[in-house]
């Protein structure tokens, strides 16, 4: 983990940080302020200068001023305050950090945030509808007990949504093969496959 | 990770200019300015402090249509370097004409990684040698002259073909095996203009300069891959690994057969997971040409392909495994309904 829980990002207490970021109206001005101090994009030659980047997360616009080294994963968690996306390995080997970028599932740990200019990013926080109804994939994971500790779950769910949309969930073998990029230490695999099967059918109907 | 400045040029000329000039013979992996496409190899090695660019040049917004196109014509297949693995893997024409290419992509990495990773980046992925990845170990590839920790270390993943006393790191890519088997070419844009190179010349064996991995200069950009048309609908890629999916090959074989009944009119064979570079097994191809393909002939071809292999403490198993993989790939390819 890159951030030490004892000293949360930007000196905000963890609880205050989380409740602030729960409503995006609060989070956005705070990040926009950071962007004001950023050097203008591509012109930056000082490797330590902040780089401005704008993208939408879950349909809301964000403007961030970031060290170019910031992964998309760290930008989501530490700068946008959306901690639903998890960091497992930080090296592309576990799938815990899966999100959708422009509708496709990707690993947020393997991309630099500054490369995502203009992108539409969907995280686990953006899956349920605004009235609170769970996405069919979330509901299916609940129905099938498709998790134990839950750490891999946001990544599993985001990857599963992408997998179904790609048309790679037509049978159990395909689900296993095309979900192989998401590891589960608790080995909830049989229930994950069952959940995806259910959600696949629900998503077709919906 | 070393701090870097970030640039996003909008065409090839601007990208080549942004890369600037570098000292003679400096490999791209040691240059001040380096390219990034999908980022799945680059970001990993930057985090590990193995790749240390001062300037990172993002190729994703280059506007040249050739870089993102998949096109088939009488001459063969054109694959843009920025095409994502997932898109090439499912392209109708590729599936129909070159199954071995689709297999090699489909069996690599994971769904998420294939959505991100570009074909150009895939070809240039750096080895997964554990000692190369962890910078506290001596490694000739990272630091010429430092010594190789793998020669007498844990070398279960390492190559049995094409190694040297300086380096035995495996080339882990899968797609490259399909390309070398099919006589592909790469189109390269450089400050001097654009040229084509046989894919077989792109990667360099380690010899005594393992830091030089390819024939590219730091400002060279792969624009596209060309695969000549050929009778290769009977072709496949067989990959053997520690787990069923989401793992690199311990041994693999790309096979394409042009058959006249049971007799081999032409064969193409490449081996993965066992060699330091994409590995064409021409002697095995020649051995099979004009012969009836059965298990005995396939075994003979496999013996020929591995005639020069040499194993070390933990990787000697790759010689029998590689041979069996090739035998199975040949017989399964023969059985394909086309
Ligand atoms: C967990 C894991 C498992 C994997 N399993 C497999 C596997 O089973 N089989 C397999 O084949 N691969 C596997 N990979 C590797 C993966 O396929 C590569 O990382 C990926 O294909 C690299 O493509 P990219 O576009 O992300 O490259 P990048 O990371 O962006 O770049 C890689 C290199 O290529 C250079 N580069 C990129 N594009 C160009 C260009 N057009 N011209 C010149 N230089 C360029 C960059 O400078 C860099 O040096 C795995 C990776 C991970 C993390
Ligand atoms: S095998 Fe090559 S990459 Fe691995 S430690 Fe030796 S020199 Fe380095
Ligand atoms: S945290 Fe990204 S794959 Fe593990
Ligand atoms: S539920 Fe614990 S890791 Fe998957």
Image (cartoon, coloured by chain):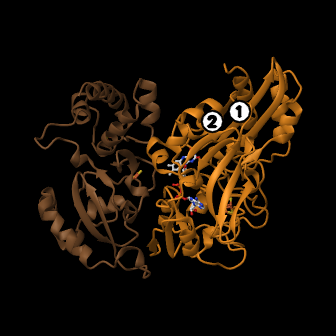
Chain colours: A brown, B orange
Question: Which residue carries the number 1 mark?
Answer: B325
Q: Is residue B23 left or right of residue A26?
A: right
Which quadrant of the figure has residue A158?
top left
Residue A86 vs residue B110, the one in the foreground: B110
Q: Position of residue A138 (x, y in %)?
A: 23, 36
Q: Position of residue A132 (x, y in %)?
A: 12, 41
Q: Is residue A184 left or right of residue B320?
A: left
User: Split into 4 quadrants, where in the image is the N terminus of chain A?
Assistant: bottom left
Q: Position of residue B25 (x, y in %)?
A: 72, 74
Q: Secondary structure at mark 2?
A: strand
Residue B63 vs residue A186, the one in the foreground: B63
Query: Which residue, as the protein is rendered here, is positioned at the far front?
Result: B74
Q: Chain of mark 2?
A: B
Q: Check contact, mark 1 vs mark 2: CB within 8 A.
A: yes
Residue B240 tag number:
2
View quadrant of ligand 4: top left
* Both marks 1 and 2 on one chain: yes
- Can residue A197 be seen by looking at this rendering? yes
Distance, label 1 to label 2, CA atoms, is: 7 Å
């Amino acid at each position: 983990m890159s951030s030490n829980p004892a000293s949360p990002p930007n000196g905000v207490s963890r609880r205050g940080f989380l409740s602030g970021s729960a409503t995006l109206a609060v989070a956005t001005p705070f990040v926009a302020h950071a962007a004001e101090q950023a050097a203008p994009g591509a012109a930056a030659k000082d490797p330590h200068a902040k780089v401005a980047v704008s993208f939408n997360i879950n349909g809301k616009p964000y403007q961030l001023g970031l060290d170019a080294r910031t992964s998309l994963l760290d930008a989501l968690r530490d700068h946008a305050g959306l901690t639903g996306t998890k960091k497992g390995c930080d090296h592309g080997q576990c799938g815990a950090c899966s999100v959708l970028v422009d509708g496709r599932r990707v690993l947020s740990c393997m991309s630099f945030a500054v490369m995502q200019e203009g992108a539409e990013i969907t995280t686990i926080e953006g899956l349920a509808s605004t009235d609170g109804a769970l996405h069919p994939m979330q509901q299916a994971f609940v129905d099938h007990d498709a998790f134990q500790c839950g750490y891999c779950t946001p990544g599993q769910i985001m990857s599963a949504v992408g997998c179904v949309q790609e048309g790679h969930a037509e049978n159990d073998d395909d689900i296993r093969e095309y979900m192989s990029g998401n590891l589960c230490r608790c080995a909830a695999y049989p229930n994950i496959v069952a959940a995806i099967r259910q959600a696949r059918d629900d998503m077709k109907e919906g | 990770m070393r701090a870097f400045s970030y640039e996003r040029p909008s065409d090839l000329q601007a990208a080549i200019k942004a890369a600037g000039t570098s000292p003679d013979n400096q490999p791209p992996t040691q240059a001040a300015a380096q390219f990034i496409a999908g980022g799945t190899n680059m970001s990993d090695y930057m985090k590990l402090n193995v790749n240390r660019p001062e300037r990172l040049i993002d190729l994703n917004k280059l506007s040249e249509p050739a870089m993102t196109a998949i096109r088939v014509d009488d001459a063969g297949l054109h694959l843009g370097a920025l095409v994502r693995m997932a898109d090439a893997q499912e392209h109708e024409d590729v599936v129909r004409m070159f199954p071995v290419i689709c297999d090699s992509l489909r069996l690599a990495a994971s769904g998420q990684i294939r959505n991100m990773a570009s074909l150009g980046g895939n070809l240039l992925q750096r080895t997964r040698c554990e000692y190369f990845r962890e910078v506290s170990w001596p490694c000739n590839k990272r630091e010429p002259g430092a010594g190789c920790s793998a020669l007498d270390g844990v070398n279960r993943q390492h190559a049995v073909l094409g190694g040297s006393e300086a380096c035995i790191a495996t080339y882990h890519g899968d797609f490259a095996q399909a390309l070398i088997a099919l006589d592909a070419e790469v189109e390269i844009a450089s400050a001097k203009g654009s040229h084509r190179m046989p894919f077989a010349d792109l990667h360099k064996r380690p010899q005594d300069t393992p830091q030089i991995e390819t024939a590219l200069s730091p400002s060279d950009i792969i624009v596209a891959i060309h695969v000549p048309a050929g009778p290769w609908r009977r072709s496949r890629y067989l990959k053997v690994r520690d787990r069923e999916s989401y793992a690199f090959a311990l041994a693999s074989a790309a096979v394409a057969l042009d058959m006249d009944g049971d007799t081999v009119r032409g064969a193409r064979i490449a081996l993965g997971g066992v060699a330091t570079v994409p590995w064409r097994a021409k002697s095995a191809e020649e051995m099979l040409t004009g012969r009836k393909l059965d298990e005995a002939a396939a075994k003979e071809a496999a013996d020929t392909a591995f005639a020069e292999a040499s194993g070390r403490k933990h990787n000697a198993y790759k010689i029998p495994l590689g041979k069996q993989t090739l035998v199975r790939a040949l017989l399964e390819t023969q059985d394909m309904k086309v």
